[in-house]
Image (tube, rainbow, N blue to C red):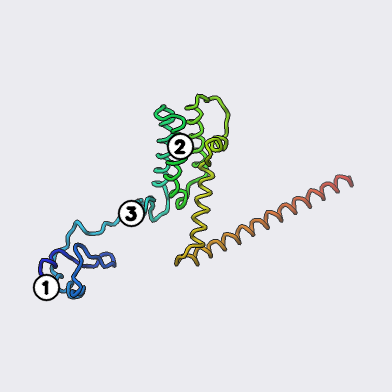
């Protein structure tokens, strides 16, 4: 076997996983033979895997995620995207038309992956809508106008970030349930659990309404008797 090929390739076990660095082996060379011949070769420290804390977020397919699922890093990135548009509008770096186009065509896609996978508090999303609405009104020289954010979305033929959050999450749930995947059974089971809980809450709410109505009727009868 050519020794130059063996020097460019190293195979070993790291954290319970088989990892191979460098160029691939020839077809006639087996992994077992390669390991036996290269067992005395020193490990390259630059290629070793690094362990990080479970609270440390990493970027994976555009989403900043950690093992604790705190989503703080992802929400912070989304917040910076919103504030960038707000600052451009407030400082007159873009026109009103450009700001509305950025809101529809740029900011929406930037926030989509976060809305699909991360848990973003509803209060935070409502704040983003308020900030954007104020910035647009200020750029339009209508600072004192009292216009709801849903009206702004209707004018620019778009949706508010609050509505987009709901839409993106609905699309993600639908894809998880319908698309071919090994996780389809799991997602369908989780959906069934959620539906049962919602049905139970609905029954309890309806039961509470009926009990309140009965109490009100009894109080009315007692009042007439007295």
Is tag 2's residue or tag 3's residue first in the polypeptide sequence? 3
Is tag 3's residue or tag 1's residue first in the polypeptide sequence? 1
- 215 lies left or right of 9: right
Q: Position of residue 142 (x, y in %)?
A: 53, 25
Disc 2 to disc 3, C-alpha distance: 40 Å
Nearer-the-camera pick, 57 or 82: 82
Disc 3 residue crowd, few under 14, some 14–19, many 20+, Cα 10 Å = few
Residue in the picture at 61% in, 57% down: 198
Disc 2 residue crowd, few under 14, some 14–19, many 20+, Cα 10 Å = some
Rendered image: mark on residue 1: 1
Residue named by callout 2 = 101
Q: Tag 1's secondary structure?
A: loop
Disc 1 residue crowd, few under 14, some 14–19, many 20+, Cα 10 Å = few
Residue 114 lies, with reference to residue 14, above or below; the image says: above
Residue in the picture at 13% in, 67% down: 5
Q: Nearer the viewer, mark 2 or mark 3?
A: 2
Residue in the picture at 37% in, 53% down: 61
Disc 1 to disc 2, C-alpha distance: 62 Å
Residue named by callout 3 = 53
């Amino acid at each position: 076997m050519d020794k130059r090929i063996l020097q460019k390739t190293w195979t070993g076990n790291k954290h319970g996983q088989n990892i191979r660095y460098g160029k691939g082996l020839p077809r006639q060379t087996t992994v077992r033979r390669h390991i036996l011949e290269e067992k005395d070769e020193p490990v390259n420290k630059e290629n070793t895997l690094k362990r990080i804390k479970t609270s440390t977020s990493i970027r994976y397919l555009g989403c900043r995620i950690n093992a604790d699922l705190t989503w703080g890093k992802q929400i912070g990135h989304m917040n910076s995207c919103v504030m960038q548009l707000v600052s451009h509008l407030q400082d007159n770096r873009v026109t009103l038309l450009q700001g509305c186009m950025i809101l529809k065509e740029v900011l929406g896609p930037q926030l989509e992956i976060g809305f699909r996978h991360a848990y973003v508090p509803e209060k935070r999303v409502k704040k983003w809508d308020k900030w954007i609405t104020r910035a647009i009104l200020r750029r339009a020289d209508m600072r004192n106008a009292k216009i709801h954010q849903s009206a702004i979305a209707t004018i620019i033929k778009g949706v508010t970030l609050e509505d987009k959050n709901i839409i993106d999450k609905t699309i993600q749930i639908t894809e998880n349930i319908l698309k071919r995947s090994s996780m389809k059974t799991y997602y369908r089971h989780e959906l069934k659990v959620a539906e049962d809980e919602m049905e139970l809450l609905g029954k309890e709410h309806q039961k509470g309404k009926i009990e309140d109505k009965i109490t009100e009727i009894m109080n009315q009868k007692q009042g007439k008797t007295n």
